[in-house]
Each structure stands twice: as C-alpha cells, then as structure tokens.
Image (cartoon, grey):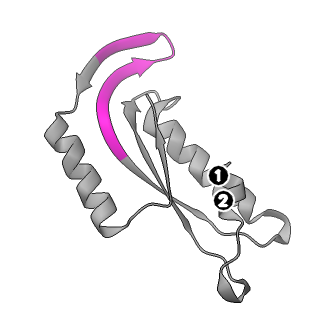
Amino acid sequence: QIQKAVRYDLEGGGTRTLRVLTVAGSDSGGGAGIQADLKTFSAAGALGNAGGQAGGSVFGMSVVTSVTAQNTKGVQGVHIVPLETVVAQLDSVLGDLGADALKTGM
C-alpha cells in the first residue's frame, strides 16, 4: 500500500516525498514497533525509486506510545508514555511536518 502511494505523479510529472507517521510502541530489540515501522517505510521508499521507475521517497516519523525492554526471548518491561506526552508529540509532528499517511499499532 505504501509503495503504491509513493509512486503517484504531481502536476508537471514530478514526484514527492510521502510523509508517513507511525503511532506505536518502541521495541528495544528492533523487531517490532516503531523501529520496524521506520525500517519498512525506508524500504518502501527505496522500492519506489528502484529500477529507474518514477517514484518518490518515504519520510518516516514517529509518535512513541510506550517503551519496552524486550528481545527475542520476550518482554522484560513496559513503560506507558503519558497521554499528555503522546498528544504533544502528535501536535509537534503534525503541526509542523504534516502527514500523508498514518500507521497505528503496537
């Protein structure tokens, strides 16, 4: 879905960067959460530019809802980010950078 969105043309035949915001928890092991989302966004942007095809890139942004201590063996701890901080992150990112797409999940 993201790859398709990246590859649309603007007026004049140009392309642009798709701004994608993930709202999710942080996985200290890097296999899930915002870390995995940002890797996926980056890969989708690379695919949009592969093979000389017309395409844009993906600029990934994040709002952290929780912080975990986890690895491949399990979750050892969780800290929920206070609602006020989540709202402040949303206001900060959307108020300045905006977003073309939003992905939520944990």
According to the picture, the residue beneath numbered tag 1 turns out to be 2
Q: Give the extent of the magenta segment.
A: 63-77
Give the side of residue 68 with respect to residue 19, left or right. left
- The overriding secondary structure of the stretch rendered in magenta is strand
Q: Residue at x 24, y 56 (%)?
A: 91
Amino acid bearing label 2: Ala
According to the picture, the residue beneath numbered tag 2 turns out to be 5
Which secondary structure, mark 2? helix
42 above or below 81? below
Task: Give the mark count.
Answer: 2
Mark 2 vs 1: CB contact within 8 A: yes
Q: Residue at x 70, y 75 (%)?
A: 9
Which of 37/12 is in front?
12
Does the segment drawn in magenta span residue 72?
Answer: yes
Q: Residue at x 48, y 32 (%)?
A: 30
Distance from Cα at disc 2 to Cα at disc 1: 5 Å
Image coords of residue 18 (percent x, y): 56, 64
Amino acid bearing label 1: Ile
Which secondary structure, mark 1? helix
84 above or below 80? below
Image coords of residue 59 (percent x, y): 51, 61
